[in-house]
Image (spheres, helix red, strand yellow):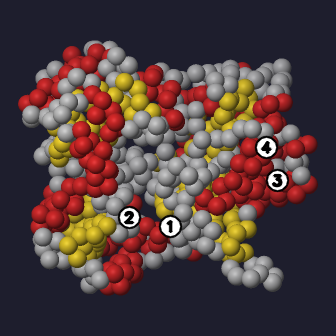
Amino acid sequence: MRQAPHRNQPGNDQMLMQTPSETSAARLKALREELKRRDLTGFVIPISDEHMSEYVGEYAQRLAWLTGFGGSAGFAAVTLTHAAIFVDGRYTVQVRDQVDESLFEYRSIPGDSLGDWLKDVSEEGARISYDPWLHTWNWVAALEAAVEPAGITMVPADSNPIDAVWSDQPAPSDAQAIVHSEELAGRSSSEKRSDVADWLGSEGLDAVVIPALDSIAWLLNIRGGDVAHTPVALSYVIAHADGHAELFIAPEKVTPEVTQHLGNAVTVRDRDQFQTALGELSGKHVSVDPDFGVVGIAQALRAGGANFTFRQDPTILAKAVKNAAEVAGHRDAQARDGAAVSRFLRWLEVTAPDGGVDELGAAAKLEGFRREHGDLRDTSFDTISAAAGHAALPHYRVDEDSNITIPPGSIYLVDSGGQYPAGTTDITRTVWIDTPSGSAPTAEMKDRFTRVLKGHIQIDRAIFPAGTNGGQIDALARQYLWEAGVDYAHGTGHGVGSFLGVHEGPQRIAKPSGGQAGTGQELLAGMICSNEPGYYKPDAFGIRIENLVLTVVRDIDGAEGRYLGFEPLTFVPIDRRLIDKSLLTDSEIAWLDDYHEKVRALIAPQLSGDDLAWVERETAAL
């Protein structure tokens, strides 16, 4: 298993003096020279690491290094004569701001196919390479099927050609792993490993390879600091049917406390030995998750003589269904978080109308409030601090170049979250920024906000039979927007981890079409989902209201079967200035008043002075 080495070579100072376009051009040229040296005609560059993580370490930010693109999803393809960057609709504006069109063509996914593009720009006999440790088996198989009829061969790289020309590539993080207490986890690692062993026995398997970092963290009750926003440690696990597990991790990460915690049933081996260990499974029946098991793992298993099969990682569903301790931890984290966000919203209401607050400053202030309320370890993702037209970009990411002052008399959207040892939070609030002399949202703004709120309420109040999946209830959130002839392009809800990933599968609330992963997963009691419908008017404003909700059993007199529903976990006032009360039914008004009563009961005891007065005012009956 390769790790990117840390290198410092001459020429870095000169590179830093170049413009972003000149830097990308020089790097693109260097990559093409490396491809020629390897007798290759192209290479595919994803945003990915060896674990198929959502967020990746600095050492794995190869696409950003090459192109300047700072989004969290997308990929590029480079041949000796052409280059293109592929992103989805979330990043249409961002990619044009950050990537030079004279160097990279802009391509939109899923509309544009990488296979079709390669066939258009390549001649018969082309050798297009990919890093087998950064792509899944199914991805490579699909691409090979698309390009082979055109005489194009996909070639797994022995080493990543980007790494060969990235002179100052950072080393992987050396942060130490930490123990996640059983009090917070709710179950011991030995119990979890026993469940995995039982699953292996029932499936007739000898071992399972677990490359997903959050699965490893959950299984072993450890956490780490190797990836921004997600408290995981770079590692692999091979779990065996006898309950024994092998953890492959850099030795310097393992403290005496972690060693004692893991015990004799977990063998700690150097991460560099992982590929060798795969070859030691000769004759064994081994499973790998198709969504996280990269080609390199499958190749090593096959070369070593293992009989491998693709099955869903057995920890994924178990991790998604939170136990009582995890639910209690989430409630504790949400209470802390709710107080911090409420204080921020009051500060924003007082300060922003003077025109002295910008997007970056607002995000920093919010993080400061979170830290004041204690135990914050990290934000759970880059805060979306979006003013005016920026709020119309659902996944906007503010930086020094895009940062603007929040205009008085406009809508401001903030989507943010925190990582606390007890739980992971994710909340979006959309608020009106007043002017010093007083102003009001437009009728259109209030109409759209209220329709989003009505959809949010419908998800929160939904009752559904056991066996229902997220794709089946997604329309509840959209119906009032559809009545007005509008919609939103993102999902309505995603799973959330316990001091782990802010986006956690397998459940998802989203339209069932378009191949959205997880929409067919049955919603189970104990699953946590976000509830976040929205509306976005390009170049004008954006609206999203997001709470986290817990899936719970609903006791219904006379029910024929088992029914489920949701309980809110997030408690922060919803801006009533943006509500058109005439569009709400009596039951919806009662829901809002009841929600705000719960906000006041939970948050008010944590506050004092002006902050307390603000929460009491904002949670008064509508």
**Viewer-nearest of discs 4 and 3:** 4
Q: Earlier in the sequence, mark 3 or mark 1?
A: 1
Give the secondary structure at mark 2.
helix
Q: Between residues 261 and 87, which one lies in front from this camera angle?
A: 87
**Viewer-nearest of discs 1 and 4:** 4
Q: Amino acid at mark 4?
A: Glu
Q: Residue at x 57, y 68 (%)?
A: 522
Q: Earlier in the sequence, mark 2 or mark 1?
A: 2
Residue contact between numbered discs 2 and 1, judged by CB atoms under 8 Å: no
Q: Amino acid at mark 2?
A: Ser
Question: Residue 18 location in percent, x, y?
Answer: 28, 14
> Disc 3 designates what residue?
592
Count residues near mark 3 (Cα–Cα under 10 Å), then give few for <14, some for 14-19, many for 20+: many
Question: Residue 270 location in percent, x, y?
Answer: 17, 61
Q: Between residues 71 and 101, which one lies in front from this camera angle?
A: 101
Mark number, residue 483:
4
- The image quadrant that residue 14 belongs to is top left
Give the secondary structure at mark 3.
helix
> Disc 2 designates what residue?
215
**Res 187 visible:** yes
Q: Amino acid at mark 1?
A: Ala
Count residues near mark 2 (Cα–Cα under 10 Å), then give few for <14, some for 14-19, many for 20+: many
- Left of 171 or right of it: where is 348? right
